[in-house]
Image (tube, grey):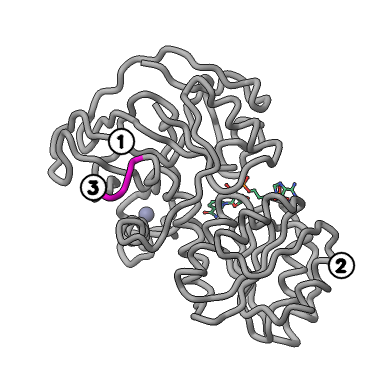
Amino acid sequence: MNVAAFTELTGPDGLEVIEAPEPEAGPGEAVISVEACSLNRHDLWILEGDSATVEGIELPFVSGLDVAGVVQETGEGVSTVEAGDRVVLCPNETCGTCRYCREGPETLCESFSLYHGGLAEAAAVPADRLVTLPDAVETTVAAALPTAYMTAYQMLQRANAEPADLIFIPGVTGGVGVASVQLADVLGARTIGTSSSSKKLGRLTELGLDHAIEATDPELIRERVQTIGTADVVLDHMGGEYTDIGLSVVRRGGPVVVCGRTAGSHSEITIPSLFVSQKRIIGSKMATQTALEKLVGLVAAGELTPEIDDLYTLEETRAAFEAMQNRESVGKLVVTT
Ligand SMILES: NC(=O)c1ccc[n+]([C@@H]2O[C@H](COP(=O)([O-])OP(=O)(O)OC[C@H]3O[C@@H](n4cnc5c(N)ncnc54)[C@H](OP(=O)(O)O)[C@@H]3O)[C@@H](O)[C@H]2O)c1
Ligand SMILES: [Zn+2]
C-alpha cells in the first residue's frame, strides 16, 4: 500500500509517497481502510523538525492523527467494532492505569500521546478508540473533527463558556480557530477573531464570526477588541504575544485558555493584570473520546458542519502541507484515499 511519509524533517519537500507493508490487526486493534485523514499544524511541526511533543522520530515517519474509514479486519479480543463499520479515530493514546486514567479526565494521562499513521491507504489502530459513524456523517467530514474540534470543545468547557458570552479567538482562520467559532456559535456565544487576511476573514464571517479584525499588530488588536467589548473568554492557540493581548482584553476573573504556540512558545505577560483583576490562564489539551462522540452527534443532527478548505489525494499531500505552511487555507485540509 501507499503512505505519505516524512522522509526528511525539512518541511513539505521532505514528504514522499512511498510503498509500505499492509498493516495487520494485532490484539485489540482494527485495520481500517482509510478514506480520509485531516492535517493539523502538529503534523507540519513534525515535518519541519520542530515538534514540541513528539520525540525520537524514526524516518520514514507516517503522521496523520485524524483518520476515518471503513473497518477491514479486527484483531483478537475486539468486540466494539466489526468489518464494514464506518468509523473515525479518537487519536488519544493513554496508559489506562494511571491516576488520571482511573479518575479522569483521560487527557491528563501521565503517558498521554497521540496516534500517528493516518496518511496511508490503511492503518492499524486501537479498536476501542474508534467511534462509529451514523449514515449522515461522511468519512471526509468525520476526519475533520478529531484534533481541532475536540480541542476547541474542551477549551470552551475549561472556560465554562456560556451562551451570550463574548469570546476572543486570535488566529481565527485555521483548524482550531474555525472550530472555536463554530462551536461557540452552537453554544450561542458571540465571537471576535483576528487574521492577517481579509479574504479568509470574509469566509469566517459567513461561518458565524461576529467581529472580524484584520490585524497582526498587538496594540492595534488590543484596541480593536476593547472597542468591541470586554471578552468573557479568550481561546488562545497562538501563544507568543497573543497571550498577553488575551489577558488584557478578558474580563476581571476571566479565563484565557491556551492550547498552542502557533505564534510563539514563549509569552511575556503583564503580571499585575493577572492578579489585580484575578484573571486566569488555563492550559488545555485535546478532549476526551466522549467529546468526539458528541461532536459526531452534532454533525449528524445538522448542527455543525466542519469547515473543509480543500480535499487532496494522498499523492497531493505535500501540496496540502504547503497550503498550511503558506497560511492559504481556512479550516481543515483533508487528504482522501
Ligand atoms: N493542545 C492541544 O491539544 C492542541 C490541539 C490542536 C492544536 N493545537 C495547537 O493549536 C494551534 C493551531 O493548530 P491548527 O492545526 O489549528 O493550526 P493552523 O490551522 O495552521 O492555524 C492557522 C491559524 O494560525 C495563524 N497563524 C499561523 N502562523 C502564524 C504566525 N506565525 N503568527 C501568527 N498567526 C499565525 C493563521 O493566521 P492567518 O489567518 O493570519 O494566516 C491562522 O489563523 C497549534 O499551535 C497547535 O499545536 C493544540
Ligand atoms: Zn494514564
Q: Secondary structure at mark 2?
A: helix
Q: Secondary structure at mark 1?
A: strand
Report which residue position mark 3 lands on.
135
Q: Quadrant of the N terminus?
A: top left
Identify which residue is drawn at 76% across, 73% down. Answer: 225
Q: Is residue 277 above or below residue 331?
A: below
Looking at the picture, tell me which residue is in the foreground, 142 or 80. 142
Range drawn in magenta? 135-139
- Mark 2 to mark 3 CA distance (whole Å): 48 Å
Q: Earlier in the sequence, mark 2 or mark 1?
A: 1
Residue 138 belongs to the span the image colors magenta: yes
**Is ligand 1 less than 8 Å from the beta carbon at label 2?**
no
Looking at the picture, tell me which residue is in the foreground, 198 or 295. 198
Residue 75 placement (x, y as % from top left): 17, 32
Report which residue position mark 1 lands on.
69
Looking at numbered disc 3 in the image, what kind of residue is underneath it? Asp
Q: Is residue 118 above or below residue 40?
A: above
Of the residues tagged 3 and 1, which is closer to the observer? 3
Identify which residue is drawn at 68% across, 56% down. Answer: 201
Identify which residue is drawn at 50% across, 16% down. Answer: 17
Looking at numbered disc 1 in the image, what kind of residue is underneath it? Gly
Report which residue position mark 2 lands on.
219
